[in-house]
Amino acid sequence: MSLIDRVAKKYGEGKEKGSLVERTVDKAAPDSARTRAAKPAKPIGAPPAAMPVAETPAAPAKQSSEFVLDFTRLREGGFITPYNRRSRVSEEFRLIKRRLMQRMALNREGGQVRARNREHVILVTSARPGEGKSFNAVNLALSIVLDEGFNVLLVDADVARPSLSKLFNVNAPRGLTDLLGQNPPDMADVLLRERNHPLSFLPAGTAVASATDLFGSPRMNALMDDIADRYTDRIIIFDGPPLLASTEPVVLAQHVGQIVFVVDSDRTSRNAVESALDLLDRHDNVNLVLNKASAQGNTDQFGSYYDAYNRGDAA
């Protein structure tokens, strides 16, 4: 017996049948003598009954604008797409992604991502410009979206040299810096959602001389509380500035749980790597990714096999 049935039985047994209104009317029904009795005079000037006031319907929630990934263009640029899931780059980013996700307490049921110390918030950076950090940030996001199906928020935090809006072919003048400035817009007004995949994109926003103060402001703390701690169904990836070109990534690092430090195998010197890592000495989870490394000897784990696989030569 349900709770409702038990309550109905407790208050209904032994009572007269009929609704509460019906029983009240029966008990108060007047006899013929009462019917012939004089009716009381109607008060003079009694105010009319108030008309019910219709409630104003709540305004519908704002919807973020949409964009569509051009996978043909992305594939030509060497990025992961649904059409090259067996490529060498796809396999290499599966290794990178797996290392990062091992530090996250992931629960696939309901798409929930549970992390103790914001391990689901990742900063991708490098020592100097041009070493491949944006390439790695985008491929990491695409690998998680296409392989795992988790929601990913990709943030262009390289305010001085933003590149992701151009890559995604979106016209987005406002973004992260506007959310941190005076009179910030609603998140829905600046956030872009990919139409066919669980990927959201927050552009860099209006250009500023330096975003260091913005990234260290109370507004940034509130923003991170909102997007990182309030929503547990997404992984957040910041494409940050280079460490040796700005003070901004050092401040950004305080808000994330993991860092991906991209090293260009042909350009990044040992001194540059050491100097950049010294700036992150207080951060526990720093992962180095060697970019543009050419395979030597038998170290090419995936290239030859998956090239043959894509040609149809592999068993």
Image (tube, rainbow, N blue to C red):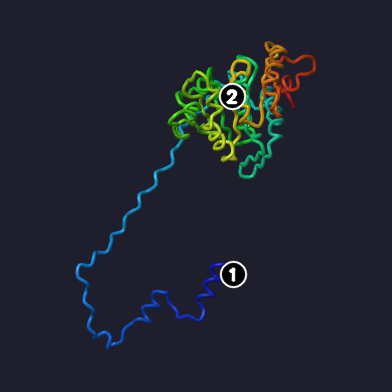
In-image side of 298 versus 256 (left or right)? right
Residue 16 vertical placement versus 282 (above, below) = below
Report which quarter residue 266 is drawn in.
top right
Q: Nearer the viewer, residue 296 or 39?
A: 39
Q: Tell me residue 177's x, y (percent).
A: 49, 26
The residue at 28%/59% (across/down) is 51
The residue at 52%/29% (across/down) is 202
To which residue does mark 1 refer?
Answer: 1
Q: Are marks 2 and 1 in contact (CB under 8 Å)?
A: no
Q: Tell me residue 250's x, y (percent).
A: 62, 23
Of the image marks 2 and 1, the number of the one nearer the N terminus: 1
Q: Tell me residue 131's x, y (percent).
A: 64, 15
Judged from the image, the secondary structure of the residue bearing numbered disc 2 is strand
To which residue does mark 2 refer?
Answer: 239
How far, Cα to Cα, is label 2 from label 1? Answer: 57 Å
> Tag 2: residue type?
Asp
Which residue in the rendered view is the most extreme toward the left? 44
Residue 45 vertical placement versus 206 (above, below) = below
The residue at 59%/27% (across/down) is 238
Residue 112 circle label: none
Q: Residues within 10 Å of mark 1 (few under 14, many from 20)?
A: few
Q: Nearer the viewer, residue 63 or 93?
A: 63
